[in-house]
Amino acid sequence: MFKREIYRKILIYALTFLFAFPLLILILWAFSGQWPWPNLFAESFTLEGWKYFIDPANGALESLATSVIIGAAVTFITLVISIPAGKAMGLYNFPGKGAVKILVLAPLIVPPLAVTMGIHINFMLLGLADKLIGVILVHLIPTLPYSIRIMTHTFEGLGDKFEAQARVLGAGTIQRFIHVTLPLISPGLFSAGILVFIISFSQYLLTFLIGGGRIITFTMLLFPLVNSGDRMLAAVYSLVFIVSALIFTLLMERVLVNPKQKTDHFYI
Amino acid sequence: MFKFRFNKWYPYLLLSPALIVLLLLFLGGVILGLSQSLGYFPVLGLEDPTFKYYLEVWSSTEFLHSLAFSLFISFVSASLTTVIGVFFAYQLLKMRNENKIINFLYKLPIIVPHIIASLMIFLILTQSGILSRFAYHLGIIDEIAQFPRLVFDKNGFGIIAAYLWKQIPFVVLMVYTVLKQINGSFEAAAKNLGASESQVFREIYLPLTAPSIASAFIIIFAFSLGSFEIPYLLGPTYPQTLSVLAYKNYISLDLTQRPYTMVIAMSLTMITVILIIIYRKILSLISRYHID
Amino acid sequence: MKKTIVILIVAVLIFSLPAAAEVLEKSWDEILNEADGKTVNFYMFGGDRRINNWVDTFVADNLKEEYNIHVHRVPMGPDDYLNKLLGEKQIGRETGSIDLLWINGENFKIAKENELLFGPFAEKLPNFNKYIDKDSKSVTHDFGYPTEGYEAPYGKAQFTFIYDSAKTAEAPSDFAGLTAWIKDNPGKFTYAALPDFTSSAFVRHVIYNTCGGYEQFYDMGEAEFKRTIQPAMEYLKEIEPYLWREGESYPATQAQLDNLYADGEVWMTMGYHPTKAAGEIEKGNFPESSRSFVIEEGTISNTHFLAIPFNAPQKEAALVAANFLLSFEAQYDKMIPANWGDFTVLDTEKLSEKQKNKFKNIDLGKATLPLEELEAHRVPEIPAKWVPIIEEIWSKEVAR
C-alpha cells in the first residue's frame, strides 16, 4: 500500500513539474543577455528587457491597460447576459431549449477565425472596426458560451427553492436578487468571471482582425515578439502577462468569493 | 396580479440578451461566411452564388494536405490529452492529503495563452533549446544538428506538445471535479466485495465520468482544430493547418480571392459541426451507463 | 458687415471642397498649422526592435518638440495594412485609421493600382525639393514602377550576406562560390520562407544568376517570365538537401533565421541593411566575428519610401512627419548603426560641406562593407509585378 502511495506521489510531482518547468525557462530567458548554445546558463544577465517594457515610448503599459479595460468590459457584459440566460437554461424547460443549448455550445467548437472573417466587412460597414467597442463585441463570441454554461450549471445546482422561499417571506424582486440569488450564485460568477477575463485577455486573432491595428492590446505586442524570435523580450512580456493574469485572478477571488464557500467546484 | 414568472414567455425573456448576441454576432458571422464562400459578396461585386470555389478548394492538394495535417494533430493531441488527463485526475483523487501547491501549479497552463505556450515549447524543444543543451552536457550529442527536429517539423510534434501542455490541466480539472462528486461508498463497497484497484477504476469511476471525458475530448479536439496561434508559431512551412491556411489566404492582397478563404473557413466549421453531431450520438449512447 | 459675409461665403466654399485636393492646395505654413497638435498613425513593419525604437524615441520626440505632433507607431506591415485599406476602399470608407505608411516595391504597386494612396504629395515637402535628386531613377521609379510623387523616399538599402569569420575563413566572392560553400557546409545555410521580404530578395539573386541577368525582365510577358525563371527553381530544389533541415522547413521569418545564425545553428544569414551585422554585434546578438559580404555579380539595392493612404484622417500631420524624415537631422541620425544604420536618400550634390562630412564620419563598424565596395557591386530590382509571381511559384515548387 505504501509503495503505491509513493509511486503516486512521485508521478504527480513529476507531472506537476512538467507543467511548471516551462515557466521557469521563461524566467531564465527574461533576464538573459548573451546565451549561446550549449550553455546551460546565460553568459550575462540584464534588465534591459524590463527597462524596454517600462519605457512609455514602447506603449507596453498602455496596451496592458487596454487589455484590462477590454477584459473588464467583456466580463461585465458577459456576466450580465449570462445570469438571466443561466437562470432560464438551468431552471426552466421550454420548447426550443435543445436548440438553444446547441447555439450556446457552438461558438466553443466553431473556429472563431471563421466567424470573425465572416463579420469583418460588416463590422467595417457599421463603423465598428478599429474601435474599442468592436473589439469588445467580438470578444463576446468566444466567452459567452463558457459563462452561460457555468451559470446554467450553477442555477441547476441551486434550484429555485431559495427564491421561492424568499418570495413567500415577502421579499421584492430586487431584494431577492441582491440578497438571495447573488450571494448564492457568486461561486459560479467567480468561475465565469475569471474564465471570461482570461479568454479576453489572451485574445490575439480576433483583436487583430477587428481592431485593425488601432486597438493595441498586450497580446498584439506579444505576438510579433514571439514570432520574431527576440527571445529575451518575448520572455519578459510573457512573464508580465502571466503575472497580470494571476494578480487579476487573486483580486477577483478576494472580492467575489465568500471564504466559507471556497470549493474546487468550477461548474464547468 | 400578473403572475409574471409563470408566463410562458419568461424564460425567453431571460434568454433574450444572450440570444441577440449569439444570433447576431455568431450565427450572423457564420451565415455571412457561408454566403461569401458560395461566392455571394456584393461589397466586392460578386453576385452569383456558385459552388465553384468549393470544388476548386476541395480538390486542391494543398487543402487536402492541410486537412490531413490538422486532423492528425488534433486527434493525436486530444487522445493523448484525455488519456493522460484522466490518469492524472484519478491519481489526484487517490492522494491521501490534498496538496495546495500541486493544486495550484498544475492549473497554471490554463491561464497561459497559446502564444506564450508556443514560446515556451519552442524554448525547450528547439534544436538550440534547453533539452538540446542538456543532451549536449549529458554527452548524447556533440552538435546542434544532431538533436532531433521537434518543432517546425512535418509531424507537428511541437504543436502537439504545446497542445498537451495547455490542455491536460483543463481535462484534469473537468474530470477531477466530477470524480470528487462520486460517492466514495461505491468504491468502499466494491473493495469490500474483493474488487481490485483497476476494477474499481474501470467499473465504477470510468463509466460515471464517461460523459465528462467524452465532453472534454470533443471540446479539445474541436478547439485545437480551429486554433491558430500554436500552429502558426510552431508549424512547418508546409503543410500548414487549415486555420493557418485560411489566415494566409485572408491576408493575401487580392480581395476577389476572398471566397477561397471563406471556403477553407467554412470547411473547418463543417467539420466541427459534424463533430458536435457525433458527440451527441456518443453522449446518448453513454448515458445508458450514467447514474444520475 | 459685408466683409464678414464674404469671409463666411469663402469659408463655406472652402469647407465644401473635397478634402484631398484641398490639402494639396494649402501652403506649407497652413499645413504646419493644421498639423499642430495632431496624431500621426504610422503603420510600419514591426519586427525590428531597433527600428521600432528609433521611431519611438528620436522621431517621436523630435516631432513632438518641433511640431507638436504625436507619433503613434503601429507594428503592422504591408501585408496586413494593404488588406485593411483594400477593404476600406471597397466599402467606401472615407476616413480611415492610417496616416503614414512605410512601403515599397510590389506593395506600392498594389496600393497605387488600387487607388489606395493620397497624392501626388512628394513635391509638397520642402525637404524633398531641397535635398532629393528628383530625376534619379531610384526616386522616380520603385522596382521599375513609376512613383509619380505618390511616395517620398525614406532610405536606401542594399542586400548583403552575413557570415561568421570564426567558422568560415574566407567568404565566397561570387555566386558560384556561394553555391560551392552551401554544398561544402551542409545544414549551415538557409533562407526564410517566402514571402518574407529579405528571402524574397535572396531568391531574386538566384534568378539573376541562373536565368541570364536582370535586364530581360523589364519587357516580358507573364507566361514567358514563368518559363524563364525555371532554372532558378531548379537551383533552389537542387540545393535543398544541403540546407538547414534539408529544406524540410524554412524559418518562418528573417528574425528567426537571424536567431539560428546567432545560435550557431547556421553559419550565414542575410539582410537588406549593410549595417545589420554591425548593429547586431553591438546589441550583443551576433558573434563579434560576424562580417558582411556581397557577390561579384552584385547584390540588389533599392529605396524604401513613405506614402499616405487615400483616407488618412490627418493628412497634414502626415506630410509634416514625412518631411521631417527627409530632413538632414533625421537622415543622419538614421544612418548611425546603433540607431538603425539605414543609408540616406539625400543627394550629396545638394548637401553642404559640413553635412557631407558628417555623413562621411559615421562609423559604420568593422562588419560593414565600405561604401565603395557596396556601390561597385550593386544591381537594381526587377519590376514589382514579378515579385508576387516569384513567391507563388516558390510556394508551389520549392516549399513542398
Image (spheres, grey):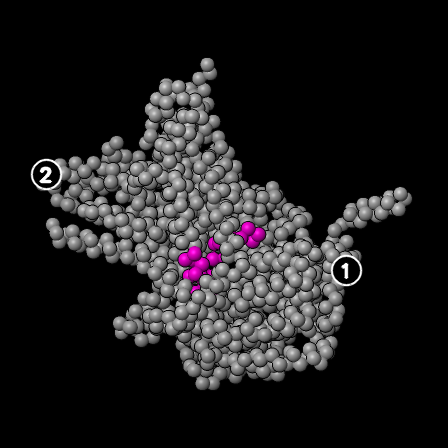
* Residue B3 falls in image quadrant: top left
Residue C284's place in the image compared with B152, above or below, is below
Q: Which quadrant of the view contains residue B128?
A: bottom left
Q: Residues within 10 Å of mark 2 (few under 14, many from 20)?
A: few
Query: How far is the residue under mark 1 from the one under mark 2?
Result: 95 Å
Q: Residue at x 44, y 66 (%)?
A: A47
**Residue A217 colored in magenta in the image:** yes
State the residue in front, C257 or B181: B181
Q: Residue furthest right?
A: C2
User: Residue under circle 2?
Assistant: B192
Q: Let me know if residue B261 is in the magenta part.
A: no
Residue at 21% over, 41% down = B205
Q: Is residue C151 visible?
A: no
Left or right: C389, with A90 as reference point: right
Whether residue B14 can be seen here:
yes
Q: Position of residue B80 (x, y in %)?
A: 29, 52
Point out the stretch of residues depicted in magenta. A213-240
* Front-most of residues B52 and A96: A96
Q: Which amino acid does the dot numbered 1 rest on?
A: Asp
| Main secondary structure type of the part rendered in magenta | helix
Kindly identify the residue that appears in the image at 49 percent across and 60 percent down: A54
Q: Among all residues in the image, which is located at the extreme bottom?
A: C170
The kind of residue tagged 2 is Asn
Relative image position of residue B14 (x, y in whole percent): 45, 28
Neighbourhood count class around disc 1 (C-alpha, 10 Å): few under 14, some 14–19, many 20 upward? few
Chain for disc number 2: B
Give residue C148's position: percent from left, percent from top.
Answer: 72, 64
Residue corresponding to mark 1: C29
Q: Is residue C23 left or right of residue B125?
A: right
